[in-house]
Image: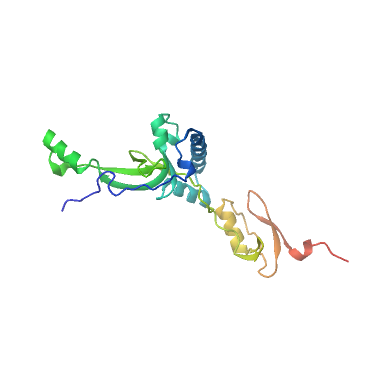
Amino acid sequence: MTQSWPQPFEGVRGTDMSEHMLLSLREPALAHREALIAMGRNLRTATLVGSPAPVVRRMSDRISHPEPGDLVVTIEVLYGRRDPDDRLKGFGIYLAGRKEWETTDEEWQAECLRYGIDPADRGTDTVFYIQYGPDPGDICRWHNSEAVALPVQDGPFSIDGAAEREDLGEGRQRATFTRDSLIGGLADSGFRLKGEPGPVPEEGEHLVTVHAPSGAITEIRPVATTRTARP
């Protein structure tokens, strides 16, 4: 049975983005695009390092594997392609990435008739689609390229160093740190823990001093000893 693939643009739909400032095609908005592109280039460069910390590795994986709805830029535009049309259409919302036929059914049939090609020799392509403007029809199909996500969404890449957080209301919060959660948070950020950091008591609240960059715990003080005594 012959494998069937989608045709170019088949099933790809844009949405009304007239309220999305970053997809505005007006001249003043283009400067905002260029600023994000420059920041994205620097971020990608910062994550392409040897032996990255876990948080850096997660960030690198995320920006290298965009998902539908992500703000993205093509690799050519990211690294300086100056063609105005490419810069316009190489920045926008990632719609889909997939393998599909190189040409539409009608185009392929015409090529087979014109050049005497065996219909079974039909080629495929790996592509992705970007909505680059506010109109649902502002869609560009890219191939032989790569999309890089610009992480403008909320949410950190690092793990929380606290074992537990309690909302106290009025914008206040109580965070509880344990030995394991504190060491885990440091290791996730790339600290190299040397030697035995020493026990952190499980009971009570303590202030822990950590040496940077080694990550060694150098001092543990009960919170009570740090308060000023009142008469």
Taking the image as shown, residue 201 lies to the left or right of residue 137, namely: right
**Residue 25 location (% of width, % of height):** 44, 36
Nearer-the-camera pick, 13 or 194: 13
* Quadrant of res 175: bottom right
Way the structure is coloured: rainbow
Which quarter of the figure is the C terminus placed in? bottom right
**Residue 96 location (% of width, % of height):** 35, 48
In the image, is residue 61 above or below residue 180? above
Q: Among all residues in the image, which is located at the extreme bottom?
A: 203
Nearer-the-camera pick, 71 or 226: 71
Residue at 34%, 48% in the rendered image: 13
Residue 167 seen: yes
Residue at 58%, 52% in the rendered image: 192
Residue 76 seen: no
* Quadrant of res 217: bottom right
Q: Among all residues in the image, which is located at the extreme right?
A: 231
**Residue 33 location (% of width, % of height):** 49, 37
Taking the image as shown, residue 182 lies to the left or right of residue 121, namely: right
Taking the image as shown, residue 183 lies to the left or right of residue 22, namely: right
**Residue 228 location (% of width, % of height):** 82, 61
Nearer-the-camera pick, 211 or 176: 176
In the image, is residue 80 above or below residue 22? above
In the image, is residue 45 above or below residue 221? above
- The number of numbered discs placed on residues in the rendered structure image is 0
